[in-house]
Amino acid sequence: MENLTMEQILFPNIDKTPADYEAMYPPRELPEGAKVTRFAPSPTGFLHFGSLFAAFIAAKTAGKDGVFYLRIEDTDKKREVENAVEGIVNGLKDFGIIPDEGAISDDAEIGAYGPYTQSRRTHIYKAFVKDLVAKGLAYPCFMTEEEIAGVRAMQEEQKVLPGIYGKYAKYRDITADEAKKRIDAGEEYVVRLKSPGKPDGRIKFKDEVKGKIEIQENILDIVLLKKDGTPTYHFAHAIDDHLMRTTHVTRGDEWLSSVPIHLQLFYVLGFKAPKYAHISPIMKEDAETHGKRKLSKRKDPEAAVSFYAEAGYPAGAVNEYLMTIANSNYEDWKRANKTETIDKFPFALNKTSKAGALFDIVKLHDISKTYISTLDTDTVYKAVTKWANEYDDELYRLIAEDADYAHRIFSIERGSKKPRKDIGKWSEVKDYISYFYDDLFDGKREIAENIAAEDAIEILTRYSKLYDPAGAPEDWFPQVQELAAELGFARSPKDYRNEPEKYKGHAGDVAGVIRAAVTGRLNTPDLFTIMQVLGAGKVQERITEAINILKG
Ligand code: GLU
């Protein structure tokens, strides 16, 4: 019998070579300087806000000229959840993040650089490991869990670097014959890298976010293929990002300390290393300790991306918020370019926070209020309808039933130079517009404290006769001022302030009583417009009801 080589023993069925794959996945033909980025989640069924942030950064880095793709890292089958890919794809889509290539569902994908799901790439990883084995750069390791634990205990005692390397790497120089005997005897093994690293070796690299970094090079014989033949994260990262022609690896900074391993892998594989950008996690101020901690899946509802969809934060607003945490100069830019969209902002990786931005829901809410205030009526109507269709049947029914009426409601004070910033999320809409619908209106009337009930009754009785639905908008307040003067109120707050003892209040208070009668609120958008939308019949009905309530 002929003597088999180590790579023939380990990979008898792998017939393709790295060169074959290089030819199958040639360098991309993109404009000079175009970047290729990816989002590479594990399909665990939960899209974390931090992951959305990572995807956002990757998508923005690729921009219009580049390619942004979605790769599914499913080598850890234990953590996998059914239909998780759809969850990820839709979760990103909710926020307008649509990859150019990659997985689009659990079993479909687009793009010429796939498969984009790691569990479907095993043959590719093996071809590269086979080549490393043939070159003497990787070897099978038969150490058992117990043996490894024994080595670790010893290393701890000797206070040396823990792990399998140098003299601790028992099978580093194993012969093909011995490997064959063990395999034939049914022993399990992993394939390890024969690390070329030196204990005194240092590596330097420039991280696009963190800046210049110098650290000890890798000396560990890290695992490339696990016992079941699947790759480790490290190895799959090197192969995939090379063959998919990633130029910029943007990922969480928990991977920063693995860069020496990764650069070494790129080196032994003969690949050009990509640029790295390690993103700091989004932080949160802990309610109890007031210290900073990572946004937590367990403690913070806002850690789940579904939180934003349920609350009804528009995708555009969440995107703007993500940009404020991604690039701190975004807000200044936005102030200077009020009417520009976020796509025009020159996003830069090196302006990303090194330390980790603090999550701030109040800020998101403010951004969202401003964002919603700039949307036109029909956009608001459609967005609220879509949201309500999913989360609020009653609201959906009401606004779908009479779309024209709902449009008129949403158009109030919209489109002006200084639009109102009242709505921060779609879940606030129902309460905000409740007085336009008898089904939602609670009927309560809050009259300002400084107005006596009999004065309020007088105001309403008189106004009910004066109210002219066909009147011009500019006439309505002078009419209220006239009424105010007749009933012993000042025409303006200024007159009232100058001689408070002379008056019961001022015209604003009179308008306030009418407002409270018609809407139940002390604060609303322009009351005349509201009355126009409600219609004369409804206005009179509300005034009569209010008078009756006041009379007790
Ligand atoms: N699957 C890895 C993770 O979820 C991806 C890291 C990377 O982007 O390379 O942490």
Image (spheres, grey):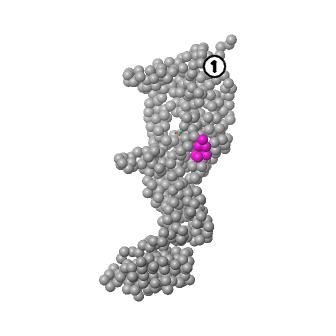
Secondary structure mainly formed by the magenta segment: helix
Residue on which the image places disc 1: 9
Q: Is residue 354 visible?
A: no
| Residue 83 part of the magenta-drawn span | yes
Question: Residue at (32%, 85%) from the top-left corner?
Answer: 502
For residue 460, say whether it is visible.
Answer: yes
Amino acid type, callout 1: Ile
Name the residue located 66 percent from the left edge and 28 percent from the top edge: 17
Q: From the image, which quarter does the C terminus lie in?
A: bottom left
Residue shown at 45% from the left, 52% from the top: 328
Camera-nearest residue between 439 and 375 = 439
Which region is colored magenta?
A: 82-88
Work out whether residue 54 or residue 218 is closer to the camera in this orientation and state it: 54
- The quadrant in which the N terminus is found is top right
> Dividing the picture into quarters, in which one does residue 393 lie?
bottom right
x, y percent for residue 36: 59, 43
Q: Position of residue 386 (x, y in %)?
A: 59, 59
